[in-house]
Image (tube, helix red, strand yellow):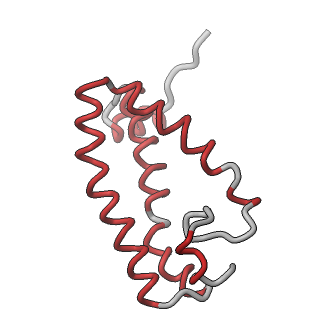
Amino acid sequence: MEKAPTPESRSRAALLGGLPSTFWWLWTGWLISALANFVFPFLAFFLTARGFSPSRVGLVVSLFGAGSVIAGPVAGVLTDRIGRRPTILFPSSVLPRQRLPSPFSPRRSLSGWRSSSSASLPNP
């Protein structure tokens, strides 16, 4: 047997507008994504504290922004051509496998991979 709604629960429902659960799932996902993206402004402080030069930090932050600008339209075209699910599943399955060896690399670059350009970077 269900309990009768209390005045507090009725006022909370009126405040939230009686929105459907789908809205709240989408809103929660958006909030988590926004909180994750909030980390990137602090990337410059982190890299500077790790000993990277200001010019190298500026380059990394700029490249991250440029990648974000380019990735949106590319993902849109891929979604239109091959569909949403493959566009999401491919990077979700490939990127973790690429990152798996990162902690075991003897000399890590900014991306965690050994490269010829990593010789000039400080070893964290």
Going by the image, does 67 lie left or right of 80?
A: right
State the quadrant of the N terminus: top right
Image quarter of the C terminus: bottom right
Pinpoint residue 86: horizontal percent, then vertical percent. 41, 26
- How many numbered circles are shown? 0
Q: Which residue occupies the foreground of this view, 18 or 25? A: 25
Question: Where residue 37 sits in the image (x, y, percent)?
Answer: 44, 59
The residue located at (54%, 39%) in the rendering is 94
- Which of the pair 118/19 is nearer the observer? 118
- Across and down, in percent, residue 99 comes to 63, 51
The answer to whether residue 57 is above or below residue 1 is below
Farthest residue toward the top? Answer: 1
In the image: residue 101, left or right of residue 110 = right
Nearer to us in this view, 112 or 8: 112
Q: In which quarter of the image is residue 82?
A: top left
Q: Which of 103 and 37 is in front in this view?
A: 103
What is the residue that sits farthest to the front in this orientation? 116
Q: Which residue is drawn at 27% across and 54% down?
A: 70
Q: Residue at x 36, y 68 (%)?
A: 63
Give above or below for 67 relative to 87: below
Q: Which residue is drawn at 57% across and 83% down?
A: 120
Locate residue 65, reporting x and y percent: 33, 66
